[in-house]
Amino acid sequence: MDEMEEELKCPVCGSFYREPIILPCSHNICLACARNILVQTPDAESPQSSRASGSGVSDYDYLDLDKMSLYSEADSGYGSYGGFVSAPTTPCQKSPNGVRVFPPTVPQPPPQQHLLPQPGSLPPIPRNSCITCPQCHRSLILDDRGLRGFPKNRVLEGVVDRYQQSKAAALKCQLCEKSPKEATVMCEQCDVFYCDPCRLRCHPPRGPLAKHRLVPPAQGRISRRASPRKISTCTEHELENLSMYCVQCKTPVCYQCLEEGKHGTHEVKALGAMWKLHKGQLSQALNGLSDRATEAKEFLVQLRNMVQHIQENGVEFEACLVAQCDALIDALNRRKAQLLARVNKEHEHKLKVVRDQISHCTVKLRQTTGLMEYCLEVIKENDPSGFLQISDALIRRVHMTEGQWGKGTLTPRMTSDFDLTLDSGPLLQTIHQLDFVQMKAGCNVAWFFPSSVPAAPMLQLEECCTQNNSATLSWKQPPLSTIAVDGYILELDDGTGGPFREVYVGTETICTVDGLHFNSTYKSRVKAFNASGVGQYSKTLIMQTSEVAWFTFDPASAHPDIILSNDNLTVTCNSYDDRVVLSNSAFSRGVHYWEMTIDRYDNHPDPAFGIARADVLKDVMLGKDDKAWAMYVDNNRSWFMHNNSHTNRTDGGISKGSTIGVLLDFSRGIVIFLINDEQQGPVAFEGLEGVYYPAISINRNVQVTLHTGLPIPDFYTPGEADPTGSVC
C-alpha cells in the first residue's frame, strides 16, 4: 500500500487528491490546484466563432516546442470533455515570459458569481484562461464552462478515501488552499469536510445553510461510504446521465450526445458492458505487470545478495592479495638478508686484509727505523778501525732492508670500494608487470630476465572474453621491452586439464578460437619468438565457456530447397521431397538437450528429427543413410531409423504446436526422443561416439522452430560426470 501512495498524490500540492479532475491528457489534478495554476492569455478568437468556422480541432501545446500540434476532434478522442475549445490552425506564439499566447478570441461574459461559495462549486474563471498539465506540460485553453468541463475522477477519489481510511489518517479540510488543516466537521448535504476557519467563512450557520446537518469527520466518512454511488452526468449535458460509451472517442456519452452531438455517427456500446470489458483488460494487463514486479523483487534480492557477496569476496580477496604481497616482501627481505650477509663478509675481508697489511708494515717500519738510528750512531763514531769492522755488514743490512720495501710493498692490498653492484632492474620491471591473471586466481609473478629472446607477453584481460563456445584472447608486449618480436604462439589445453596444444601461430596480438567444448574450463597462455629463440610464457588465463549449447540451423549445410528465417531458428521447405539441414554446432561429449516446435503441419507428412554426421545425404529423409540417426513421426505414430532400418514403432504422433525434444548423452552414448515432454519409445540409439550435428529433414508441408540452451529434463539422470561441449 505504501508504494501506491505516490499514485494518490497531486503533482501540484503533493497531498492526496481532493476532488480530482481528469485533464484531456489523462493526467489528474486537484480541482483547487487546477484553479491555482490557471494562466490568463491575451484575448483570442471566441470559441463560438471558432466552432462556427468548422475548424473542429483541439490544441495540444507542448511547452518545449515553438508550434502547436493540431488534432481533429475525431482523432484526438478529447472532444467529448468539453473542457477546452477548438483552436485556429495558426500556431501559437511564445511571449518573452514563456507563457503561450494564442490568437485573439472574442471576449466572453464572465459566469455568474455566487454571493457565498457553495461547496463543490468553482469560483468564476477569468476569460481566455489557459491551463498546463504539470506532468506532461501540455497546455490548453478553457471554454466558457471553465474547469467544470473536465470530468471528475470519482474512481480516484474513492481509492484515496479508502486508502486514507486504511491508514487511519486524520481527515483534512477540503477548502484550505495551502497546508490543509485537520477537518472538524462534515456537512452531510454539501458532502464537504471543513476546518473551523473554513466552516465559518464558507458555511456560516445562517440562511439555507443553517438547515444543513454537520457531523464529526469520522461519522461523515462512514456516511459517505455508506451512501449510494453517485451517477456521473455528462459534461456537455449536465442533466443527462452517462449511459453509453463512444468507441471512437473512447469516452462515456449520454443519449443527447448521440442525438445532437458529434457522437451521432460514431460506434457506441453499453456503458456497463464496456466497463466490464475494460476491467477485464486491466486485470489481464496487471497479471503480466505482476509477473514483472515479482521478477524485479527477486532480482533485487539477488542484487542485495550480490552486495553481501561482493563485500565478503572483497575482504577475502584483499586478505589474499595482502598475503601474497607479504609473501613477496618476505622473499625480498630474505634475499636482502642474504645480500647483506655477502656485503658484511666482503666488508670483514677487506678490513682483515688492510689490518694485516698495517700490522706487517708497522713491524717492518719499526725495524727499518731502528736500523737507521743505529747506522746514524755508528757514523758518529771516530774510531776508523772499529767502523770498518762493521761497515760492510751494516751496508748489506741497509740494502737488504731497502729491498724489502720494494715494488708493491707500499701498495694497498685491498681497495676501499666494494666491487658489488646490485642488478635490481629485472626485479623492478617484474614488479611493474605484476598483475592479476584472473580475479579468483592467484597473483602469479612471471620473472623476467634480460636476454635476446622476447619477454613474456602480457594478456589484456579487459579484452579477453568467452561467448558461447568461442574464446577471444588479446595480448601485448611489456611496455619496457625493446627486443624485436617475429610472432606469437597461442596455446590452449583440452578443457579437462590435459596438455597444452598450439591453436595459433602468427604476428597478430588478438585471436578468437571457435568450436570449443561447452561448459568447459580452458587454460590459455601465449609466448613470443624471434630469430634468437622462444621467450617465456605469459601468465595462464582460465576461461569458462557457456554452460549450455546455443546454436542455430546452418544455412551453409542446408539443402538449396530449405528456407531459413527468424535468425536461422525457423526452417521450412519449398519442395514436396524431404530435405535436410544441420545445425552450426557439433557435439562430441557431454549431455545436450534441444527442442523443436511444429509451426505448420499440413496433410500429415512425416518429418524426421535427430543427429547426423557432417557428410549426411541432404536430399533424402534423415536416417536413410548410415550418416544419420533419427526419429520420423506422423500424426499417429513414430519410428526410429538409421541406415534405412526402421525400428520401434510407437503410438503417438504430432500436430501443429507439438514439441519434439532430442536428448544426446555422450556419457552413455545414447539418444532419447521426446514428444510434448513425454519420452517417445525406449532409448533410440546406443553406442554413439564421435562428432554429431543436430539435424532435421522436412518438406513444404512442415515448418519448424528450434529452441536451444535448454536444461536437461528433470526425469533424466545423466551418466558419468562429463563436461558438456561441442567438437573443436
Image (cartoon, rainbow, N blue to C red):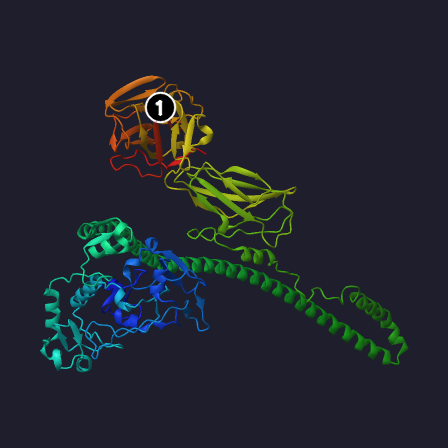
Task: Point out the residue furthest to the top here.
Answer: 645
Can you identify the residue that label 1 sits on?
629
Identify the residue shown where x is 44% and y is 73%: 97
Identify the residue shown where x is 29% and y is 28%: 673
Reply above or below: 294 against 382: above
Front residue of 22 and 725:
22
For this view, does 218 lie left or right of residue 556? left
Reply above or below: 279 against 346: above
Front residue of 386 and 231:
231
Front residue of 682 and 188:
188
Q: Quadrant of residue 32?
A: bottom left
Reply above or below: 705 against 83: above
Give the quadrant of the N terminus: bottom left
Q: Amino acid at mark 1?
A: Trp
Across and down, in percent, residue 261 comes to: 26, 56
Across and down, in percent, residue 660 comes to: 30, 31
Identify the residue shown where x is 45% and y is 51%: 438
The residue carrying pointer 1 sits among few (fewer than 14), some (14 to 19) or many (20 or more) residues within 10 Å by Cα, namely many
Across and down, in percent, residue 287 comes to: 24, 50
